[in-house]
Image: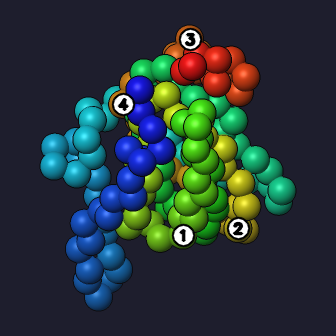
Amino acid sequence: MANIEDCKIITLPKIPSEKGSLSFAEAEGIIPFDIKRVYFTYDIPAGAERGGHAHKNLSQLIVAASGSFNIIINDGKKEKTIFLNNPRNGLIIHSGIWREINEFSSGSIVLVIASELYSEDDYIRDFIKFKNSIC
């Protein structure tokens, strides 16, 4: 079972130019899983909270493509808050980790790169059931 110490910040490569910078993510050598889905959330209202679930099988890289936010991760024993505010840095969250995202700055965009296609069956949306499943 994963723990929060397995969730790491990775720094994406940067290619700077006078026209702006480009960063990228690839499954081989940068992200430790095959990429099956990419999505992003935006137009997030003030005070909103996202996440509030764990995944049974899916791993993710979460990036603050714009703005900033906190990600609270919990493995059932420990909890940690990670602040993301740089589009080159992303947090790898493995399956079996509860996550909540909050404290969004205005104009935040949450970019998520996932190891699996969407499946409602992969979600654990109740924290008590999550804690009971890992004990």
Callout 1: helix, strand or loop? loop
Q: Which image quarter holds the C terminus?
A: top right
Read off the residue under disc 4.
Answer: 115
- Residue for point 16% across, 43% down: 28
Task: Identify residue for label 1.
Answer: 85
User: Is the residue 98 above or below the residue 124 in the image?
Assistant: below
Disc nearer the start of the sequence (1/4): 1
Q: Say which label, 1 or 2, has the lower sequence index.
A: 1
Which residue is at 33% across, 76% downward? 21
Q: Is residue 33 left or right of residue 6?
A: left
| Helix, strand or loop status at disc 3 | helix
Quadrant location of residue 69?
Answer: bottom right
Circle 2: residue type: Ser
Name which of mark 2 and mark 4 comes first in the sequence. Answer: 2
The reply to whether discs 1 and 2 touch (Cβ–Cβ < 8 Å) is: yes
What residue do we see at 29% from left, 58% from top?
Answer: 24
**CA gap, disc 1 to disc 3?**
31 Å
Q: Position of residue 11 (x, y in %)?
A: 32, 64
Residues 61 and 25: in front is 61
Do the residues under discs 2 and 4 have CB atoms within 8 angstroms?
A: no
- Find residue 99 and name its label: none
Q: Mark 4 and mark 3 in contact (Cβ < 8 Å)?
A: no
The quarter in which the N terminus is drawn is top left
- Residue 120 horizontal/vertical position (percent): 59, 15
Circle 3 is placed at which residue position?
121
Secondary structure under tag 2 reads: loop
CA gap between label 3 and label 2 equals 31 Å
Query: Is 108 placed left or right of 24 in the picture?
Result: right
Closest to the observer, 129 or 62: 129
